[in-house]
Structure formats: C-alpha cells, structure tokens
Image (cartoon, rainbow, N blue to C red):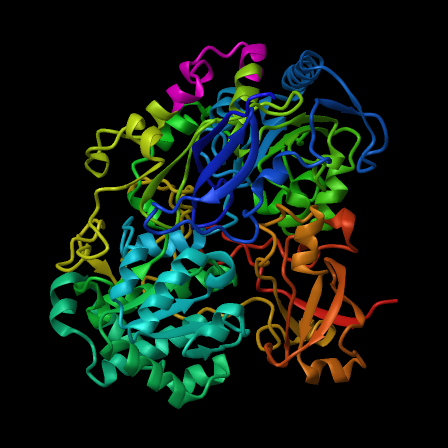
C-alpha cells in the first residue's frame, strides 16, 4: 500500500471580513483535504462561518481557471482559448506598451479590492507596479472610507475598544452591522456579555438576523441615524447625563456642540427617523447611565449621503458620556488603525508621477462608458481581487464600458466571473492555501499568518508572482518587484514597532497568529485619560476648518491627507439624496427605499457560483412589507422586478414585517450571468458627504410583478 503523508499548516481566511479567522489547513499527499478553525485563537476560537467550512472544495472546484486564456468570442460570451503564460504576458505587455506610446500610461487603470486581504497578494498587491507605470490611480473607497474620515476627524487613528473587551461591557450598541452574518466571532463575545447581564441594542432599518437576537431592536428610517445620534446628545446634555469631568479634560468643542444639539430634540428626530420621541429619550438615558457602554460601528452606517456626519455624531457619544474611562467602554470602528503595516512600502506612492489623475472605483462605469470628461481615455483595465459587475454601482454602465472593443481588459481570477467574462486575457490566480501571506485583520488586534502548503492546480499563479513577471517584462527594476513573498512580509510589517514586541515572522510561522501588544481584553482602556491620537490629544466634538478628505485604505497616519472641500465643523444630521422626503419628485416614480446588505451565504460575490452555497443562501429574494405588496398585487413567492432609471433586477418576493412599509431589502452578491440582474444595477455611484464612500443604501426604486 502506498504511504499516506498527512500534515497540518497555519492558515488565515483571506476574504473581506472583519473576523480574519485563524485556520488550519489539512494536507494529504500534497492535496488540501480539509480546513478547520484554529481552536487556539482567542477570538475566532476554532469556528468558521458557513462560507469557509469546506474551503478546500473551492480550491478544486471543476470550474476553476487553470490556464491563461485569450478571448475568442464576443465580450461577455465566455468563449476563450488556452494559451501559455509567455503568450499571455507578451500580449499584455505589448498591448500596454503600445497604449503608453500612443496615449500615455494614464490610459491604463488598475482595479482591485479585498477579494483577498493579504498584505502580499491582496488589495494593494499591484499598487507598486501600476504606480511605477504611471497608470491612472484607482481610488478604492467601497467600504469604510466615509467612516474613516469621520472617525479620524473625531478621535484619530485609534483601534478603540478591543473587540474582545466587549465581554466587560454592560450596554452594547451594534449600529448598522449584521454581526451574525458578517462579524460572527465578535457576535459570540457580545452574546457572552449578554448572558452576563449586558443589554444588547441593534440599530438597523430592518429586522436582521442580529436584530432578532438583540434585547432591543431600534429601526430608524434608512439614512436617519445622524438625527438619532444628535437627539441622543440633546437628551444627555439637557438632562446632565454627560461626564462633565471627562468632557472638560479630554474633549474639544463641547460648548459649540451643546449649542447645536439644543435645536435637535427627540421630537425633531422623531419626525425624521420615524421613531417615537420617548423611545429616543429612553435609549439616550440607558446608554449614558449604563457603563461601560460600547458601540460597534458598522460599515452600513456610512452608506447614505449624510453617512459621514452620522458617524461623527455617533463617535462623539462615548467621550460625551465618559464611556472611554472603562475597559469595554467606548467604540470600535476599524482596529486596523493600530496594526503596524507599512503601506508606503507595499504601495510605493513615491513612484506616482506628479499630476497623475485619480478615478474612483465606485464610478468606474462612468469612466469606461465615456460619461466622464477625461483628457485621456481609458484604453486598458486590469482587474484582480474584485468583481465590479456585481459589486460596484451602476452595473449597466460598467457592462457597457467593458463591451467596448477598444478596451483591452485583463483579469486575474479564480473563476470566469461576471467581470472576467468580458476580459481579453484571463490569468488563473492562486487561492489561499497555495501562497504565503499575512492576512490583514480589520476587525481585531491579531496578526494572522497564512502558509503556502500545496501547489496551485494547473498553471495558476499567486497575484504577486503575476506582477513580478509583468514587472520583468516591462523592465521595472525596483527591489519590490524582485522580493520573494517571504521577503515582502519581512518588509511590509514594522517589526520594530512597540506593538510587535516579541513578535516576528518566525514566531508567526510557528504559532499562526499573534496578538499585538496594545493591551489585553481585560485591561485595555486606551482613552481612560484622553490620549487620543489627534493633534490635540483630545476627542474633537468640533474641528475648526474641517475639510473633507479620503482616508487611504488602512493608512496609519493622521496628518498629510489631501484636503478637500470645507465641511461642517460640527456633527449634524444630513439628509439622504433619494428618499420620499428629500426627493418627492423622484419618489413619484420610485417610492421605495432599497437596502442591500451583504448576504449570509456568500462573501461579497465569492461563492455565489458554487452550487451548495447557492442552495444554502437561496435564490435572490426581495423582502417587502405587506402594505407595499398589497398595493402592487404581489403575493409571497411571486417573481418581482426591482428597478429605477439606472437598471433593474429580479427576485422572489418575501412578504414580511421584518421590513417597514416604504422599504425593500435584497442582499447583494448574486452573479449577473446566473440571475436576472444584480442588486447594484439600481445603485447610484454618487458619493456620500465624506471620504468618497458609496451611497449603496441611498436609492429609490419601484417594485412590480415580473413579466
């Protein structure tokens, strides 16, 4: 009998999720046979979500791309022929050099996001290459940049409350986050605190899985969270519930904030939010007097035009009440602010030629289809770690642009995704167990190592190797393009930072993870005595001369951002663009607000082409209140069409009181080629008030029976 060689290896979930689970890869005779959670990790505790529990099957899925391919049929047809890597790289670089000669390098644009969260192979993995080229800079602000801008203006680049410290919280507010589906391991900690007596409040316009498990679900109208937070501050100050000692010593601008909120009482907020004024008073009183209180800020909170200002208002609450004094008190946005990653080394912004233009990824459809007035047209795009045809706004415009015969499109992918189907050259990319990396953790305070333990099937290559080979073909000589993956990890982390004391790459290879030295769950209270990483060291209720800026993804500095237009020096409620109240003319045609949360069974668009995951998630649904369904003669189970002037998609009606009248809910992630449209067909590519964040929940639609 042939001998069986079994080994176990450290892994990290590479997907776009705050949990960044520590995993164990099980390998048998050189093949990945199983994946399990690492039970030694104090936060992820050996658990995996429904997406990852059989991750090995994705590695060996029969539809996986195994060889470089060249398009042979019409764009979008999925007709390709196999070619060699040399042919693929020669064709790409020959085409790019010709485009650069005729139009200049800004006629080329890269497009990537967090389909992989690794420091080496993830979001920023191609930045140095395209910055060296002088290509158009693609500004990536899909997730959190409005929140980041507001957070930095108020408290600076602090990790805030350690997610593990919520075990000590007495009052927990999950604001705009469906933790059960998108932050599961933090939810386990919240549930433990709940069992110890903590009250859990979920603020969400619809009754999500998380809201159903909370002690109290507060459901304001979409985009009105800022009004709720302002009214809370009104109550807290009017009733003297603020921690005046903390306010006097560790905050700036209290007098001006107090003056503003005088005109923001609960009755004012009730008209805007649809909540009862007494409910708002009760919430404010409970939050202020139940210490330690903690707020988990979700990304969804930013996704209306006034989202940035809403987050500023919410972020003021812990300092106003002195919640920061306590372990388990304060707020959590992105703990990654205190991770010692060296993004200047990873991305090499110093290579960007002066005057290089910037185009935002959210508006890529407008850029590709000629809607933008560009001095240099986009003649080529390379896409990796992203699937904009499902995930970006104004999908129909993206497809229109990708159909251009004069657009040379390159895609590095695992499967022939909606976006890859429009490519001229498709490159097969490696998956998690097939490459070494450290997985960025934007939801906790651990470094997470991922070991290469199996070879890629077919001719698939890791992203960084693809860029190394492209750099060699283009003649780029910088050291970045010659480093091995291991050398990248040595250079991409500030191992000398105090947070890394006692931690190095060898330690991570042995243990798989390490908690940063920034305090423990039982003693971390970073702002007990102020010490905010702001210019004054205080929490800023007010910022004189405040300007809008885009916080580069996970950039770990406070000063030096490119300033934008002036913004209000104080937080406030800012109305959405598309609601019946703010835009009654548009609401005559499209009277319903749509919310498009992440799904429970897919991860963005990952797994939405895999049969058992589709079965688990179910077909595209449209949750609608009975009042709205009756007006349209819609019955549960009917196929309906959701549409506006930007496009439309179809789904199966679910009549439920989990959504209020005037709101419909449809989760994103479904592939366009497998369904009749996708949710983002109806999404606007306009920005919110701060940080160029997307307005994915600021859209009016109509719903009718499908024909």
Q: Position of residue 589 (x, y in %)?
A: 74, 73
Q: Is residue 339 above or below residue 150?
A: above
Please identify the residue farthest to the front as the structure is shown.
1
Image x and y of residue 685, in percent: 61, 53
Q: Is residue 318 left or right of residue 603?
A: left
Quarter of the view holding residue 170: bottom left
Residue 272 versus residue 56: which sits nearer the camera? 56
Quarter of the image for the C terminus: give it.
bottom right
Is 495 contained in the magenta span? no
- Residue 383: give x, y in percent of width and height: 62, 33
Q: Is residue 74 left or right of residue 325?
A: right
Residue drawn at point x = 54 percent, y = 48 percent: 53
447 relative to 382 in the view: left or right = left
Dominant secondary structure of the residues highlighted in magenta in the image: helix
Query: In terms of image quadrants, where is residue 295?
Result: bottom left
Figure check: 395 above or below 381? below
Q: Is residue 88 visible?
A: yes
Quadrant that contains the N terminus: top right
Residue 504 at x, y percent in the picture: 27, 28
Q: Which residues are magenta?
A: 470-488
- What residue is shown at x 45% (from left), y 88% (from top)? 276
- Asked whether residue 357 appears in the rendered view, the answer is no
């Amino acid at each position: 009998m042939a001998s069986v060689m079994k080994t176990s290896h450290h892994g990290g979930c590479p997907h776009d999720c705050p949990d960044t689970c520590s995993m164990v890869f099980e390998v048998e005779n050189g093949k990945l046979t199983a994946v399990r959670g690492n039970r030694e990790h104090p936060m992820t505790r050996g658990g995996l979500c429904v997406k990852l529990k059989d991750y090995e099957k994705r590695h060996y899925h029969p539809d996986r791309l195994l060889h470089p391919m060249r398009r042979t049929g019409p764009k979008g047809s999925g007709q390709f022929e196999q070619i060699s890597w040399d042919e693929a790289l020669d064709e790409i670089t020959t085409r790019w050099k010709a485009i650069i000669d005729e139009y200049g390098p800004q006629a080329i644009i890269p497009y990537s996001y967090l389909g992989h969260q690794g420091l080496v192979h993830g979001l920023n993995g191609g930045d140095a290459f395209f910055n060296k080229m002088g290509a158009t800079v693609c500004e990536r602000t899909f997730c959190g940049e409005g929140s980041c801008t507001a957070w930095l203006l108020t408290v600076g680049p602090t990790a805030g409350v350690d997610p593990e410290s919520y075990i000590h919280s007495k009052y927990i507010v999950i604001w705009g986050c469906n933790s059960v589906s998108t932050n599961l391991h933090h939810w386990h900690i919240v549930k433990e605190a709940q069992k110890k007596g903590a009250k859990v409040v979920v603020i969400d316009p619809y009754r999500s899985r998380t809201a159903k498990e909370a002690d109290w679900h507060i459901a304001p109208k979409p985009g009105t969270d800022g009004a709720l937070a302002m009214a809370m501050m009104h109550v807290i100050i009017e009733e003297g519930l603020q921690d005046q000692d903390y306010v006097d010593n560790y905050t700036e601008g209290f007098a001006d904030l107090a003056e503003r909120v005088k005109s923001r009482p609960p009755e004012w907020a009730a008209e805007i939010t649809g909540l009862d004024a007494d409910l708002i008073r009760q919430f404010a009183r409970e939050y202020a007097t139940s210490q330690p209180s903690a707020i988990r800020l979700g990304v969804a909170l930013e996704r209306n035009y006034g989202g940035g200002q809403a987050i500023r208002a919410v972020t003021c609450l812990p300092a106003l009440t002195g919640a920061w004094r306590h372990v388990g008190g304060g707020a959590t946005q992105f703990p990654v602010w205190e991770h010692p990653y060296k993004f200047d080394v990873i991305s090499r912004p110093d290579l960007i030629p002066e005057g290089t233009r910037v185009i935002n990824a959210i508006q890529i459809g407008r850029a590709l289809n000629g809607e933008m007035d560009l001095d240099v047209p986009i003649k080529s795009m390379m896409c990796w770690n992203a699937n904009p045809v499902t995930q970006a706004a104004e999908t129909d415009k993206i497809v229109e642009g990708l159909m251009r015969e004069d657009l040379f499109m390159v895609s590095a992918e695992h499967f022939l995704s909606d976006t890859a189907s429009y490519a001229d050259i498709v490159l097969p990319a490696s998956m998690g167990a097939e490459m070494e990396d450290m997985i960025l953790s934007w939801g906790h305070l651990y470094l997470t190592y991922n070991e290469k333990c199996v070879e890629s099937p077919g001719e698939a290559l890791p992203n960084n190797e693809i860029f190394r080979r492209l750099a060699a073909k283009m003649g780029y000589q910088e050291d970045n393009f010659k480093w091995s993956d291991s050398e990248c990890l040595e250079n991409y982390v500030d191992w000398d930072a105090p947070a890394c004391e006692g931690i190095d790459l060898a330690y991570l290879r042995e243990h798989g993870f390490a908690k940063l030295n920034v305090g423990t769950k039982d003693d971390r209270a970073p702002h007990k005595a102020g010490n905010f990483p702001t210019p004054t060291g205080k929490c800023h209720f007010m910022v004189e001369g405040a300007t809008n800026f885009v916080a580069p993804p996970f950039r770990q500095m406070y000063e030096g951002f490119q300033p934008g237009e002036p913004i209000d020096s104080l937080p406030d409620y800012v109305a959405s663009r598309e609601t019946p109240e703010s835009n009654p003319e548009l609401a005559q045609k499209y009277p319903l607000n749509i919310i498009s949360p992440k799904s429970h069974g897919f991860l963005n668009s990952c797994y939405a082409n895999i049969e058992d995951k589709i079965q688990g998630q179910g077909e595209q649904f449209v949750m609608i209140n009975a009042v709205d369904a009756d007006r349209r003669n819609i019955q549960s189970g009917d196929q309906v069409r959701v549409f506006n002037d930007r496009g439309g998609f179809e789904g199966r009606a679910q009549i439920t009181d989990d959504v209020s009248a005037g709101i419909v809910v449809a989760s994103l992630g479904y592939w366009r080629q497998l369904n009749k449209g996708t949710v983002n067909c109806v999404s606007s590519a306009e920005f919110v008030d701060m940080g160029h964040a997307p307005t994915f929940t600021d859209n009016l639609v109509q719903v009718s029976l499908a024909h």
